[in-house]
Image (tube, coloured by chain):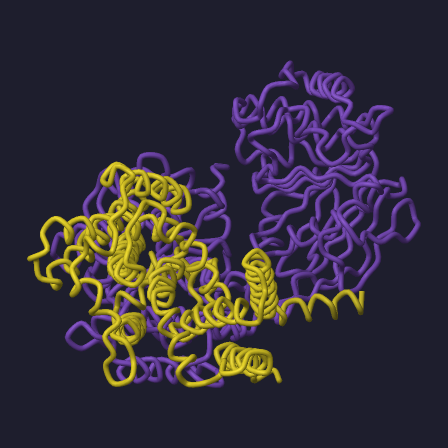
Chain colours: A purple, B yellow
Amino acid sequence: MNAVAPMIMTTPLAAETPILEMRGISQIFPGVKALDQVSISLYPGEVTALIGENGAGKSTLVKILTGIYRPTEGEILLDGQPVQFPSAQAAIDAGVTAIHQETVLFDELTVGENIFLGHAPRTRFRTIDWRTINARSRELLQQLESDIDPTIRLKDLSIAQRHLVAIARALSVEARIVIMDEPTAALSRKEIDDLFRIVQGLKRQGKAILFISHKFDELYEIAENFAVFRDGKAVGHGRLKETPQGEIVRLMVGRDVHDVFPKVEAQIGPAVLSVQGYSHPTEFRDISFELKRGEILGVYGLIGAGRSELCQSLFGITRPSAGRLTLEGQSVEIRTAQDAIAAGIVYVPEERGRHGLALPMPIYQNMTLPSLAKTSRSGFLKAANELKLARQYAERLDLRAAALSVPVGTLSGGNQQKVVIGKWLATQPKVIILDEPTKGIDIGSKAAVHGFISELASQGLSIIMVSSELPEVLGMSDRIMVMREGLMAGLYDRSEATAETLVRAATGNA
Amino acid sequence: MTKLLKSRELLLSGIIVLMIAGFATRAQGFAEPGNLVNIFNDTSILIILALAQMTVILTKSIDLSVAANLAFTGMAVAMTNAAFPDLPLVLLIVMALGIGAFLGSINGFLVWILQIPPIVVTLGTLTIYRGMAFVLSGGAWVNAHQMTPTFLNVPRTPFLGLPILSWVAIAVVLGMGFLLTRTPFGRSAYASGGNPVAAVYAGIDIGRTRFFAFVLSGAMAGLCSYLWVSRYAVAYVDIANGFELDSVAACVIGGISIAGGIGSVAGAVLGSLFLGVIKNALPVIGISPFAQMAISGVVIILAVVFNARAEAKKGRIILRNRATHEATA
């Protein structure tokens, strides 16, 4: 994908000098360029919104700023002086603090311990100074207009209260730069208002804030500046108030989506899978759709919208609380993954390492794991049959390995992905669910995966593709279902779907 | 060297051969075939229990109750033999397997249905089964003169140069090798421990797999209970006290990953033989039993360190990349 979006430079940024400046930062992982020559500046008393799709490189940037990754190239300037953050402690010492999306706190410790863990004040005798911890914790929490008792255990707090503790923890060090990574994801509107009051307070104290969020209305409310990342590149920055939302979405998604992901038209046949009123006690409610033969149904939504949970329950990992499933006209009940595999529904999970493969086991044994009934004879495994089946799919997927008997753990990421896909194709499914099929792989490999998905569809497989990447969803899908907060927020035909409609449906910004 | 290291079984065999050769220089006749047969026969029970333990460990569990199970079942079988000398031996062995499997199934049930961590379950049943052995016997011993000659003599009857006891161990080794490499149960065991989440996604019921691993482990403990009681010609509450740790140690030395999913039958057998050789050699070369325990402990820790290093190597590709990152950063 080489579509080059124009760098837009609206009015020059505030005349003040930035507290922190990152110049030409690149972060290269084996096979993936997570960040490519990005630059970003953070100004005192201002909020900079960092915008981009999942996988655009936002988290990588945060990890560099907090000393977890060391950039492959580029420099970081603090007050104009080059600095390095070789460790998380170095970043904290330099005044960078982060509030993470998933708060990293300890349930069994008290609020005060959580706030001061790692930098607890000491008494004269080098023991923990509890009095100071509790007094300062109370002070910090009062700043946040909260009267949480610092001596109670964290597990007794609500989610929103925990968030306040996380913020208090971030403020307990002398921070000049505060990073907030989707801080509002778990909060109600009222709590968000409280949080924004805190942010305004931080601004008045002259702190520079990097604010990551998917919710545009919030960003326009709180941020002065913005920077948009796409595929690891900084594609635009400027003053937020002077930039219309449409422009931001266009920058986020890039242009010419349909050209970048050329979809091979497949023969669409009769309905294969029909889902009616699928519900889960906590994750999603009343989902209904039909999937036709040869069709690719894209499922778009923000993280936490219930997409993976829906797919997992279609695959029998979790049980739905209500709803019916019809496969090729027959009503089916799926209680376990075995049922799903037997019925012809398979699921290629998002995290191939964690969910997909048993790394110490040989390639061929991983590939045949769900197909053992087919390769065994009278209840005993037949290595020859297994190898034959594995070889067949290894060839089809162009798997590169020294031998099929080596442990999967010795393969590269791309080849591991092929083993996962081969494993499921070997079961000869009717419906294949792909959860974020190209997450974490580079652009070149993405194209290969997309080509392969198209090929599967043209062979008559029905595909459900969960993806957080708009270009991928728009480019590959025949129809697109959007989910928001566990509900269906829309179902669009390929012809009527645009980046704007999907983003609006997913974020609820009508 | 790296190739050699890759084949842990080969390396371990080499170490065992070297150890035997070394001990032979200090104690004459240590490497004689007759003595080696003795060592193997002495180690047979450990081999069987280590294989049972390995099956459980493969599934990312652990069975600390094997020795207590052995003690209870052994007591039950010995008392039955003493009370009903006319019962045929086959029936007693079936009974031992059955009681053992039942006790194992209690572990398996608690782990599977109630989802209690295996180490907690088997730590609990360890004391329960020992206590049951006491309740059953009232603390009394069953001595050699109370048992029938058939009961005592069958395992030590020589057959083709080896006692029956050794043949039983060999049969179990072959059977376990077949079970773990040629049946869906064996594959499920490796997959359940190698990556439980992936196993669930592949349609494997890891709870049921663990349950059967515990049942198998219990049945093997039951089999060993008869072998043990007849070999030492006595049954009392404290037999095989601490033997569960030997079975775990044999697995660890044999390269079975305590985290599950990695290990081979050959490894468990060699790990057992390694311990067996040390146990037999140290008294011969005049080392006190207390020093023996310490030496065994040192060897076990060394094996764990060695294992940890070998397992860490798998991540070396990533680490090397990270190292180059830092070098270029």
Quadrant housing the C terminus of chain B: bottom right
Q: Residue at x 36, y 58 (%)?
A: B56
Q: Which of B234 and A12 is in front in this view?
A: B234
Q: Which of A2 and A127 is in front in this view?
A: A127
User: Does residue A278 appear in this view?
Assistant: yes
Q: Which residue is drawn at 80% across and 54% down?
A: A86
Instruction: Give the left or right position of residue B164, taking residue A221 as reference.
Output: left
Instruction: Give the left or right position of residue B58, taking residue A33 as reference.
Output: left
From what the image shows, is residue A164 above or below residue A478?
above
Instruction: Give the left or right position of residue A238, taking residue A493 as reference.
Output: right
Instruction: Give the left or right position of residue B233, taking residue B35 as reference.
Output: left
| Residue A493 horizontal/vertical position (percent) | 35, 55
| Residue A504 horizontal/vertical position (percent) | 48, 43
| Residue A429 horizontal/vertical position (percent) | 25, 67
| Residue B114 horizontal/vertical position (percent) | 30, 39
**Count of numbered circles in the view:** 0
From what the image shows, is residue B202 above or below residue B27?
above
Q: Residue at x 59, y 19 (%)?
A: A152
